[in-house]
Structures are given as C-alpha cells and as structure tokens.
Image (cartoon, rainbow, N blue to C red):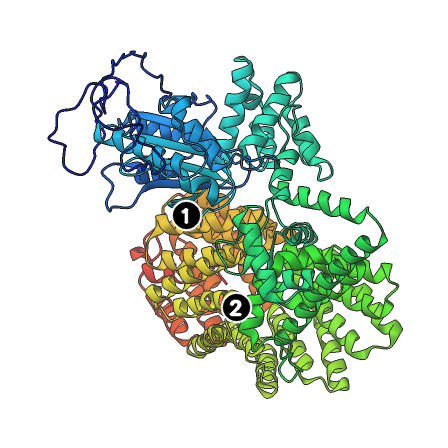
Amino acid sequence: MGGKSSAKRKGKKSGKAQKQGQGRPGGAVRNDYRGTGFANSQVVGNGSLKATTYVQQYAPVPTALDALPALPQEFTGRADDLAFILGVLDPDRPGDGPAVAVLSGWGGVGKTTLAYAAGHAAQQRDWFTGVLLVDLRGYDPHPAQAEDALEALLRSLGVRPEHLPPPGAGREVLYRSQLNVRQAAGERLLVVADNASALAQVQPLLPPGHHGMLVTSRHGLPGLGRIRTVNRLQPEDAVTLLEAALKKSDSDDVRVEEDPGAAERVVLACGCLPLALQITAALLAQDPDQPLSERADALSQTEGVLDGLNDGERSLRAMFGQSLDRLSPQEQDLFRLLSLNPGPDIATPAAVVLTDQPQPATERLLGRLAASHLIERNPAVRGRWQMHDLLRAYANEQAEAVKARGRDPRRRYDQAHTRLIDHYTEHAKAADTHFHPPGSTVSSRFSDREQALAWFDAERENLIATAHTTPQAGLDLGFALGRYLGWRRRLQDLVVVRSLALDACKTLNDTRNEAGAWNNLGSTLRELRRFDDSHDAHKTARDLYQQTGDTHGQASAWNNLGSTLNELRRFDDSHDAHKTARDLYQQTGNTHGEAGAWNNLGLVLQELRRFDDALHAHETARDLYQQTGDTHREATAWNNLGLVLQELRRFDDAHHAHQTDLNHCQQTGDTHGEAGAWNNLGSALRELRRFDDALHAHETARDLYQQTGDTHDEAGAWDNLGSALQELRRFDDAHHAHETARDLYQQTGDTHDEAGAWNNLGLVLQELRRFDDAHDAHETARDLYQQTGDTHGEAGAWNNLGAAYRDLDRFDDSLAAGRRAVEMLVVAEDWFRTGEAWGELATTLTAAGADPVQVRDAWNESATAYTRAGADEEAAASRTHTDSTKIPEEQLLVGGCPPSEESSGNAGTSAGA
C-alpha cells in the first residue's frame, strides 16, 4: 500500500523493533500462529543433532486490497444514506461500538452500489488503507459459505494457499490474526461483504479492532452493527439516473430533456428502483427512436409490467424469485395472499382474515416477510404493512400461477378474497352507525365515533378499492362510506363510491336502493357545484321514491332538490320544495328530517329577503335538533340563525349564535363546520367594529378551509378577510385578499361569488385611489351579477360604481348609477342599503354642485330608509347631513368636493358574507 496509514487506532504502540516484513505497511506479512497448539507433533530424537539449514527466499505474496469497483456514472442521490454510513465508519466517531453498517433493502434498490460509494468516500477521507470485497451470493441457489468467504479474504490478504488452514475455526483465527497484525502496523481495512442472506455467512467475517465493515443484504441481519434500510430513489434522483444511463450509451440522447413529463412517468412506473431504471435505460438504448412516452405507456400496464423489465441479462422477476425461494412455504403463501388486498397497505387483522390463521402466527409471518424486504412496515402507523407496486405485480403473478394448478387452490384463494371483502364491508357498516342521527342503533364493534373515524381514516383507500371489486361491494360500501367521506370532505372519493353504488343497483336490479343511490349522488354533485347534474339526480330519486310509495324517501329527495334549486338561484321553486319536504317529514313523524327541512327552508327565505320568516324557520330547526339530541346539526341551525340575525342587524345576537355554533363544532370535531363558524363569527365581529378579533376569526377560517381542502369556502374566507383588512386600513393586504378570493372563485367556477369578490376589490381600489381600476372592478361585478340574475347584488354593484364615477368626476354617470341602485334596492325592500345608496346620491349631488334642496331631499330619503331598517344611528347621521345643507348657497363648495369621512364610511356596499 505504501507509506504509513493515516487511519487512527487505539492502544499503545509497541516498543519492540519490527522485523523486516512484519507488520510494515507495503511489506510482506508473515502468517501468525501465535496461540496455536501442536498437540500431535512428535519428538524425532534426543541428544545433539547437527543439521545444515538451507534458506530459500520467496517473492512477496501479492495482496488484493484495492477491491472497490469504480462507481457507475449514473449513481445519484443517497446523500442521507451516505452520511449515515460514513458516520458509522468514521474513526473519530463517538463511542466504542464496531464500525459495522448493514445496508438492508429489497433486491434492486441499489445497496451494492451504495456500499461502493461509501467505500470510495471513506477512502477519499483517508480513513482506510485498503478494501477487501467478497460476494456472498446469498440469494443464489448455492450461497457462499463462511469458510469459502474466509478463504477468499485470506487470499486477498496475501496468505499463500498452502498456508490456509482447513475449513473450520482455524481459518477464522488466522483471518483475525492477519487483521490484528495489520492494525498493529498502522493499517485500517474496510471489509465489504456483499449480498449476504444469513447471519452465519457474515459473523465469522467481522473484523476485529478498528477495522470497518459494510454488509449488504435483503434481510435485516440484526446483531452485526448499525442497520440502514435503503429505500427507492426520490423521483427527481430517479430521473437523473435514467438520463445519465441513457447518455452513457449515447451522449447525444436528449429524450429526457425533451420530454421530462414522460421521463417522470417512466421512473414512477419503475418504482424509482435503480435496477428497474437501469434495465429500462438499456432497453431504451437498444431502441434509440422509442419515445419515452411509449415506454411509459408500456410500463404503466399492470398486466405484464415485469415483462418490460427484462433486458436479456437482468430480470426483475428473476431477482424477486431469488428472494421468494428463500422463504418457507407458509411465508411464500402469505406473500401471494397479500396480493389479494385491493388497497395500498393492509392492517394485521385484515391479513389474519386472509390467512385464516391465529393472529400471533400471522404476525410472525408478516415480520419475516418484512425482514426479507418483500413487504414493509408502514412507517406512520404500527400494525400496517405495505408492498411496492412491482413486488405486488410479482406476488399477483405468483398467486395466479398457484390458482392455475387446479380447482382446490383456486377455491382457496377465492375464499380468502371473499373473506377480505366481507371484513371491510362489515366493519364499514359498523363504523357508519356512529355517524347516524342520535337515537339510531350503534354497533358495538367500535366504542365511539372517534374510534370509528380512526378506522375509516386508516382504511379509506382500501375501502374505496374494495368498492371496485364486485357489484355487491360497490353497493354496500357506496352507502356505508357516504357519511364518513362527507364528514372528511373527501368529495372526489365520495362521488366515486356514490356512482359505484348506483351502477351496482342497476347491475343487481336493486330498485329498492336505486332511489337512495340517486339521492346520495345528487347531494355529492351539489357539493362539487355540479348543480344541473345534481338537480337531475334528485328529480330521478324523487320519481323513483314516488313509484315505490316511500314517503320518507320522497321527503329526503324533495329536501335535497330544494337545496340544489337554491344553488341554481331558483328561489321560489326551492321554497316550494323545502315546504313539501317539511310537510312529508311531519306526515311520517320524522322529527329529525323535519328539522333539516326547516333549516333549509330558512336559507331560501333569507335569499327571498324574508328575514323574519327565516328567523322563525331556523329557530324551529334549532329547537327540533335539540329535541332529537343532534348536537352536530344543531350547530348548523345556530350558524344559519346567526346569518339571518346579521341581516336583521342584531349583531350581538348574531355573535352569540355563531359562538354557539363554533363551540358545538369544536365539541363534535367538525373541522369544516368550525371553519364556517369562524368565518361567520368574523363577519359579526366586523359589524360590532371588533376588527382585530374579526381579522383573527377570518384567518382561522381560511386556514381550516385550507386544511379540509375546501377551495370554494376558502375563497369566502379570503374575501371576508379582505373586508376586515379594509376596516383596519391595511389596504394593500386587503387588495391581495380580495384578488385571492376572486381567483379561487374563478377556479371553482362560482360566477356569483366571483362578482362579490370583484365588488369588494373595487372598494379597496377606491381606497388606494386607483379609480380607473375600481371603476372596472365594479363594472365587472355588475355584469356578473346580471349574468347570474342577482338583482340585489347588482344594485350594490351599481351603488359602488356610482362612487367610482364620482371619484373620476363623471357626475352624470355617477348620479345615473346611484339612482339605478336606489330603484333596485327599494324593490328588494333592503332599507339599510337603500339608506346607503341615498347617502351616496346626496354626496354625489354635493360634489357636483347641485341644488341644495336636492341634496337635502336625498339625505332625508337616506334617513327615512335607515329608520325603516331600524338603523337609528345611521338615520341620525343622515339627518345631520340634512341640517348641514341649510347653509347659505354661496357657501357651498362647488366642483368636486370630496364626501365627508362619515358619509364615505357608510357608502360602500360590501359583498362579504
């Protein structure tokens, strides 16, 4: 090796002079038999013996201490893994533990290359003076034995063949002695034992002293040293590997650069597994004209995916087979059975159902499969197991091969599959009972709703996948999962299972459940804002219920149809539908359903601006929910009650209602409902001029909506947040908030609420004195309100547009817009906003230098409207303005006098909810 090693070692240096060739770096090392017994040696004679000794000098025995192959140029990623390994091998590491790292992971994940990379990195740091490498062939039909590996290592250390002890303990003693001598000479060697499959292969190879060792294995091999599980590459690293491998064959290959999207699809289809990527790169190199998209399509086909990962020299299927062959028959059987699980992972109880064996026995088998890296423990949840997609494909192939052997094995696997489906559906039905209205029968399989919810959360993907397996499973799970998925706002999943249930009803000719499937699907489509499809679904449900004479079902369909008609802004039809539902629920004695109908009836009465009637409806709903003990739905009644109290300008009562709603939602764990409570509480706080508290409430609502993935309602929180920021005169932040709300409404396709965001954006643009932009924003709001048929919202936009015209000194246009707003608001009988609009007109008349009589009349009209609305404070302010117009005419300011701060403060008509 040449020169003195820089590797650090512990212990005292020997004070004895070294003989030539003994322990000297770079020199020959003699065999050391210290401590070896010679019990069977004989004394040839006694007395004096003269002999002539002839000494023959042999050439130094060659060594092989530079065994690491060069790294492939496509090696990438693995920074964390390398840092871990180097931390184990570092001669200055803390503690006295052995410098041994075991790299464990499934076949093809890149353990060997990683070990080579760690060895090179350690040598670059001068931690080792040499590297010994031995391939234990642990998964070949005939793995290397420890004595064979010792022989190879001793030869690499320079031991002559004739000096090798026979297989047994002597070889291990000599191996350790050789390493001890090299340590004494200041050397430090790294032993790389690749591809081990059992502890017995490796334990005799453990180096003594301060030498280091790396072991690679598809098993964990506990007890040797620090274990590092090597996982698949990150997608970006996998793409880098693919590109480097292609350029290694052809430096002009630019397929990855030209189609990065297809490259990502390729690496994901390969499972980001280095061996699969290298095989794929070799196949692509053989066909340089093949687009990556074509290769990705081929690999994405579940059937035969392993056929596409064989380049003639390397085969992923063969490598998986090596691992499977080393398992016991029971372990092999469980590996195949696990492919029957339709979802991405499986819980131990579900695996027990597959095996039909006691849980302790099944857990032991699962643990052995995990130790072999054919499955993995779910790192997030104990007691759950997962399998890589490529291994799943292999397991499925093996299961199909066993089933093809005859009727008995096929029946056994079919029975296991049926047991698993029944396990999921029965548990889902039991968990669903904890989401039924109070007073319903609750399954004892789960202790409470929290436990049921936790089970649903853990098994959601398995349950949805199971719903696709058979029509009966689709029907059962389509109904059993509905309340849970709605609670969690998993709306895309919900529409999938609702559709599966409907399809199953048609396939199974189940007319009894078909109406319910249509009704449930309609509700989900409404949540997804597909209102026309929802309308058709509820009409179909209603008609089917009428055909079967199901009065309770008819009530439910009418109630849901009314809610969809409300979203379609067909308020009169919606009102009639909810009244019909209410009457049918009363007819059937369903108090809980009647409460829901009253609650929804109150919402449409608000849209019809019949606020006193709406107040009665929501109070009735609240009382009925209290009567039935449904705290969760009582919370919704309190929420809606708070909204109508705000419209009635009873802000203290509204604040109490929304606070009660918030408390109930927190009590029941309804995160989405809590978000709505915070949002509406913020609006009440804003009306109470508690702007800092309102800001906090709207920010909380926004965050919770983001947490639940409700983009539409998040937009509403942003819009209200912008209004609170305006009140705090943080106009730039308000501008950002309203722009965000507008964009989110556009994203969700809500034209009506987008109009409100434009309207509020115009108000803040006026405050920023960007009058042209404000004008454009209010015009857009007006046009969108006209498009959606909301004359009340349109009136507010006209009012704000009039203010924008005034800021631009376009007084005639401002007066025309203001008069249009007044007319529409009077028709709507919105007296508070009529008072605002008359105040805007009076301000514009003053600015335009109009006759003081006209100004005074406008303020009088404003005061009268406010009085009709019960807004005494605002009415008094308008009368004050009336009195101020009685000054002599020559003192009036003419030509664009800006409005007073008080009048402009009442002027803008916000669209915030």
Viewer-proximal residue among 439 and 121? 121
List the residue tagged with mark 1.
736
Left or right: residue 545 compared with residue 535: right
Q: Position of residue 346 (x, y in %)?
A: 61, 57
Q: Position of residue 756 (x, y in %)?
A: 53, 55
Distance from disc 1 to disc 2, alpha carbons, whole Å, reads 26 Å
Viewer-proximal residue among 438 and 694? 438
Q: Position of residue 577 (x, y in %)?
A: 74, 72
List the residue tagged with mark 2.
673
Residue drawn at x 53%, y 32% is 274
Q: Residues within 10 Å of mark 2 (few under 14, many from 20)?
A: many
Residue drawn at x 63%, y 25% is 292
Disc 1 marks a residue whose amino acid type is: His
Is the C-beta separation of discs 1 and 2 under 8 Å? no
Disc 2 marks a residue whose amino acid type is: Gly
Residue drawn at x 49%, y 51% is 741
Relative to residue 470, is residue 30 depicted above or below? Answer: above
- Tag in front: 1 or 2: 2
Q: Position of residue 337 (x, y in %)?
A: 69, 53
Q: Residues within 10 Å of mark 1 (few under 14, many from 20)?
A: some
Residue 748's disc number:
none
Residue drawn at x 47%, y 48% is 740
Viewer-proximal residue among 487 and 735? 487
